[in-house]
């Protein structure tokens, strides 16, 4: 779990982590990640709250080699990323469908 008071450090680090297995060859498993933002509580060295649970559930919706994010993360990110709407998804524990966005480094969509 990565935590930051700003979106950009977490987005950058997560993109780097998910991209790292590409340099290790085909036998290394691909990673996936989910990002969410909002108030959470730190207790006994761990984090609790809605965004923690949401990020975990978003990760379960992500395909290998991708990073999916909630709309809150997309709105808070300041650096230049490529965002694409990945559709609304039903998330366990949340009554309304949650819009999800795939995030990539800027220019990555055009490159491949």
Image (cartoon, rainbow, N blue to C red):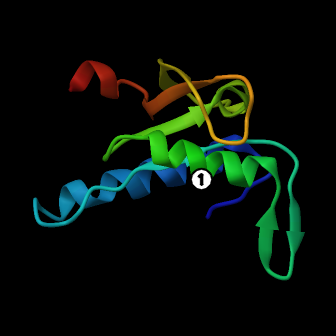
State the image coordinates of residue 109 (x, y, percent, origin top left).
Answer: 31, 22
Residue at the (43%, 27%) spot, across then down:
106
Residue 78 quadrant: top right
Residue on which disc 1 sits: 56
Numbered label tally? 1
Secondary element under disc 1, as helix, strand or loop, is helix
Q: Against 104, is 66 above or below?
A: below
Residue at the (61%, 64%) spot, across then down:
1
Instruction: Estimate how packed mark 1 is, as few (under 14), some (14 to 19) or many (20 or more) residues with alpha carbons within 10 Å.
Output: some
Residue at the (63%, 48%) spot, across then down:
55
State the image coordinates of residue 19 (x, y, percent, origin top left).
Answer: 33, 51
- In this rendering, would 53 be left or right of 103? right
Q: Residue furthest bottom?
A: 44
- In this rendering, would 111 be left or right of 100? left
Residue at the (11%, 66%) spot, across then down:
27
Q: Residue furthest left?
A: 26
State the image coordinates of residue 112 (x, y, percent, origin top left).
Answer: 21, 26
């Amino acid at each position: 779990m990565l935590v930051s008071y700003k979106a950009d450090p977490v987005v950058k680090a997560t993109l780097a982590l998910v991209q790292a297995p590409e340099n290790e060859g085909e036998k290394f498993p691909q990673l996936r990640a989910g990002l969410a933002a909002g108030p959470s509580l730190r207790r006994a060295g761990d984090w609790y709250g809605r965004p923690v649970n949401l990020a975990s559930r978003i990760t379960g919706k992500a395909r290998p080699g991708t990073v999916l994010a909630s709309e809150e993360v997309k709105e808070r990110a300041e650096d230049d990323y490529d965002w694409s709407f990945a559709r609304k998804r039903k998330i366990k524990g949340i009554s309304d469908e949650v819009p999800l966005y795939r995030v990539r480094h800027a220019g990555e969509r055009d490159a491949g």
